[in-house]
Image (cartoon, grey):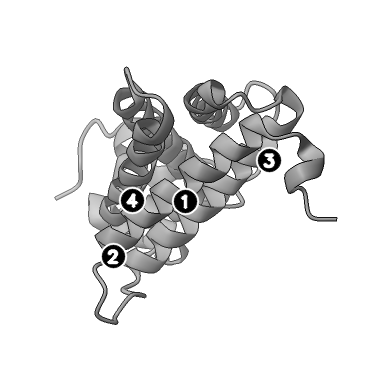
Amino acid sequence: MPRAGLNTAEVVAAGAELADEAGIGSVSLAALAERLGVKAPALYKHVDGIGDLRHRIATLAMTELGDAVRDALQGKSGADAIGALFTTLQSYIAEHPGRYRATTGAQFQGDDDPLLVAGTRVIKSIRAALSGYGIRPDELDHAIRMLRCIIHGYALLQAANGFQWGNDPDESVAWMIRFVNAGLTAVGTMPPDRWIVR
């Protein structure tokens, strides 16, 4: 039976659910219309096509992630903050793999793009978590990218069942948190010429 009173938020939420179930690459207007019980042209009242839908899914994911990261980092610093970032991103990617994938490589569409606003909020939270390490301002972007690469890569591999040998993946996470904490502490206390590889 067709859905009455469908709105844009419901369309995007349904698209995000479809992405989590089948992968963001499998999201199409036809598949989404079938799920919602409407004809595909009806979706154009809410989105400007598949590209717009995927952009909105990415925005939803980044907004949700921003809320989760903000809550996880409350009152934490140092290794506790790094651990909170790891576990929060791991959990989010495991629960919402498709919508998270939509954020990777999504292009900003101007200074007022909600995706940019949501992404900036996440970066500010991570920057705040790193503030206690004494890292120079011109090096913070590098530290943020390093953290994102490590957490993103590990979480995606884990979500894809990429760790099939005997060691407990949670022990590996604890080891990485100690390693990252030690590295960030070193960066904040050593002169750059002591630890930069040339």
In terms of depth relative to the viewer, which is nearer, 12 or 39?
12
Label disc, if present, on residue 169 of the rendered structure: 2
Question: Is 191 left or right of 108, judged from the image as shown?
Answer: right
Q: Measuring 42% from the left and 56% from the top, which residue is drawn there? A: 29
Q: Is residue 113 left or right of residue 21?
A: right
Q: CA distance from mark 3 to mark 2?
A: 26 Å
Q: Quadrant of residue 32?
A: bottom left
- Give the CA distance from mark 3 to mark 4: 21 Å
Classify 19 as above or below 58: below
Q: Earlier in the sequence, mark 3 or mark 1?
A: 3
Res 187 visible: yes
Lower sequence index among marks 4 and 2: 4
For mark 4, does the 10 Å Cα neighbourhood hold few (<14), some (14 to 19), or many (20 or more) residues?
Answer: many
How many angstroms separate mark 1 from mark 2 (CA)? Answer: 15 Å
Percent position (x, y) of residue 182? Answer: 50, 43
Indicate left or right for 2 with 89 as reference. Answer: left
| Pointer 1 or 2: first along the chain | 2
Task: Name the one closer to the observer, 134 or 140.
Answer: 134
Residue beneath disc 4: 90
Residue 198: horizontal and vertical position, in percent? 85, 55
Residue on which the image places disc 3: 142
